[in-house]
Amino acid sequence: MKNQYVSELTNGSIINSAFVVSKKQISQKKDGSSYCRLELQDKSGKIKGVLWTETLERTKDFEVGDYVFVRGEVSLYGDELQANILTLQKIQDLKKVDLSDFIRTCPKDVKEMFSRLLSLIRSMKNPFLRDLLLKFFLDESFSDSFKKAAAAITYHHSYSGGLLEHTLSVCETCDHMAAKYSNVNRDLALAGAILHDIGKVHEYKVGVVIEMTDEGKLLGHIAMGHQMVAEKINEIEFFPADLRTHLLHILLSHHGQKEWGSPRCPQTLEAFLVYHADTLDADIGSFNLLMDESPNSDWSRYARNFERRVYLKFVSDQPYKEGDTEVGSEPDVESHRVNDHWSEEKDRLFVLDNNSSDNSPPNTDLP
């Protein structure tokens, strides 16, 4: 049933395979007739699609999260691939569905990553910060949820295990930078890095598709994370008040700007460090998702979070001689995963909207 993956689709490809519906929106044309914009997903990625009026009218009801068998053709809409769907049929017999074909999971070893995170926690010299973190990560129920959580819906580390992968990367970057700059409080920076996105455990619901919870839509992970950490600090006797303030400031400021969702802007050295490490890993993760989407292209589609298309071709690291017409061959690079922070805010308000084929960035004003 699953004989074709999103990552294999190119302009002109004929679609004849099963997918899961990750987004759906019914829209209307100027003449009042309805059509459907949707997003199809499997473990290799996502592609936007459209059911035009006649096709929609003969298609039985389906919802987000349904497995569907699709026939159609891929074309370019603007500079993005789009599935023009001719038939879409909901799969009723789920015994025929292999979930591993559809659920996106972290490509790295989750156990190994979690072990590295615990090692960093245990390396801390500050007993209050170390105890605080161990209260979270030695709790089996919490740690299981953390290991399964996603870091975003769309833009970076948007799969099960993505939150752990992103958190570990931010933490290891801060550890490296703390060794470089002697005036950085290493333990405080590490604690802030580990806890900065902790609210995402409750912000996102991770299944076949990633959805935002009601709590996530109403509060957001920054507010939820602040509350979670503040409550856990209250369980630790004699936890220093200034340490509490500095740590919570990192959580509240890690998006960098108020317009990107941060209640406060970074005002301490450790907060600056966590903000930049977080942004760096999110952006690299997002860049590499674009690479995964277009493995055979030199340029990406227009990326709304970057407000531009990006160049995907690698510069060769192979030696060459004077007079060579080519600079070696491209290196074999392991797949990796990015975002900037206003894009995370748009995850909360995401509406599948591809009515315009131009390359202008979307309206990002929040209601």
Image (cartoon, grey):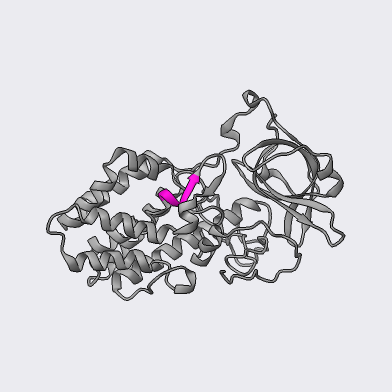
Q: Is residue 15 magenta?
A: no
**Relative to 367, does residue 2 appear above or below in the rendering?**
above
Residue under the image location 40 percent in, 61 percent down: 222
Image-quadrant location for residue 254: bottom left
What is the magenta range?
201-205
State whether residue 334 is above or below residue 362: above
Question: Residue 355: percent from the left, percent from the top?
Answer: 75, 62
User: Residue at point 59% right, 63% down?
Assistant: 321
Residue drawn at x 61%, y 60% is 312
Q: Is residue 89 visible?
A: yes
- 230 or 214, which lies in front? 214
- Image-quadrant location for residue 350: bottom right
- Say whether residue 359 is left or right of residue 217: right
Horizontal side of residue 107 vs 302, given as left or right: left
**Looking at the image, which residue sits at the far left?**
238
In depth, the one of 267 and 288 nearer the eye is: 267
Quarter occupied by the C terminus:
bottom right
